Image (cartoon, rainbow, N blue to C red):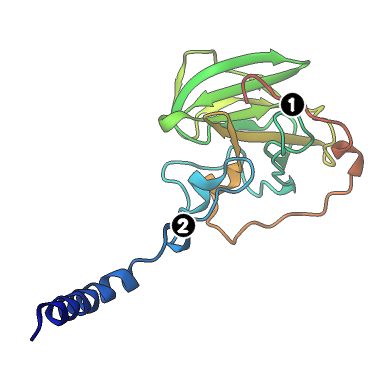
Amino acid sequence: MPNHLRATALLILCGLLFLPVLAGAAPADQRYRAPPSEPGGTADLADRPSVAIGFDWPLAPPHPVLRAFDPPETPFGPGHRGVDLGGRPGEPVRAAGAGTVVYAGPLAGRGVVSVLHSEGLRTTYEPVHAAVRAGQRVSTGARLGELATGHAGCPAVACLHWGARRAGEYLNPLWLVRPAGQLRLLPWTDAASDAAPIPRSPVA
């Protein structure tokens, strides 16, 4: 076989050998990508299959959810940075998980308790007559104080605003105690509460 024909045949053979490899390598922009995180930084807890280990409700049953979590689109935009649980004035408010109290006292005219848990997760409870102090270690279910009245927009006699945050991102606290797909809300009719922006709390 002449040299030029031999070289041509060799090139064709090499092309056939590498073709399956090239066909199997999809372009970078067509390969699998993880789904984007949900608004409000909820990706960390959203993809777990069941309830978070070691966490429990901050109020005794039936703890109805009267207002849902609605993360703001901007840091100071309107929204609801937690959930409102219906309760009774004076009933115990308990730590949802073990951690350290980082704040306990008045804030903007209401009593607030904030607990730092492992991996930077922080839960916040208001309005509460605090029975703990900053720096105090608490276990899951430890009494943080008593539920107070006066939560703005609460359709019940008393509501506990329960929030969760990690690395500056607001999370839905219900994911700490309920598997995905089991969230049920009671009707809530106070439309005026979403009209004004809610300032970001330094302890939430």
Q: Disc 1 to disc 2, how far (Cα)? A: 46 Å
Q: x, y (%) of residue 191? A: 90, 44
Q: Nearer the viewer, residue 163 or 44?
A: 44
Q: Secondary structure at mark 1?
A: loop
Q: Secondary structure at mark 2?
A: loop
175 with respect to 188 (left or right): left
Q: Position of residue 147 (x, y in %)?
A: 70, 29
Q: Which residue appears at 70% of the width and 49% of the height? A: 64
Q: Residue at x 70, y 13 (%)?
A: 106
Q: Which mark is residue 33?
A: 2
Instruction: Say whether disc 1 or disc 2 marks the residue closer to the N-terminus.
Output: 2
**Image quadrant in which you'd find residue 41:** top right
149 or 81: nearer the eye?
A: 81
Q: Quadrant of residue 24?
A: bottom left
Q: Residue sitting at 47 percent across and 16 percent down?
A: 136
Depth-wise, is mark 1 or mark 2 nearer the camera?
Answer: 2
Q: How many marks?
A: 2
Left or right: residue 70 versus residue 182 is right
Check the image and report above or below for 36 versus 3: above
Whether label 1 touches label 2, CB < 8 Å:
no
The x, y position of residue 115, in whole percent, is 53, 25
Q: Which numbered tag is attached to residue 148?
A: 1
| Label 1 CA crowd tier, 10 Å (few <14, some 14–19, many 20+) | many
Q: Quadrant of the C terminus?
A: top right
104 relative to 57, above or below: above
In what quadrant of the picture does the N terminus appear? bottom left
Outermost residue on the right side: it is 192
Tell me which amino acid carries mark 1: Ala
Give the residue type at disc 2.
Arg
Q: Is residue 202 above or below residue 158?
A: above
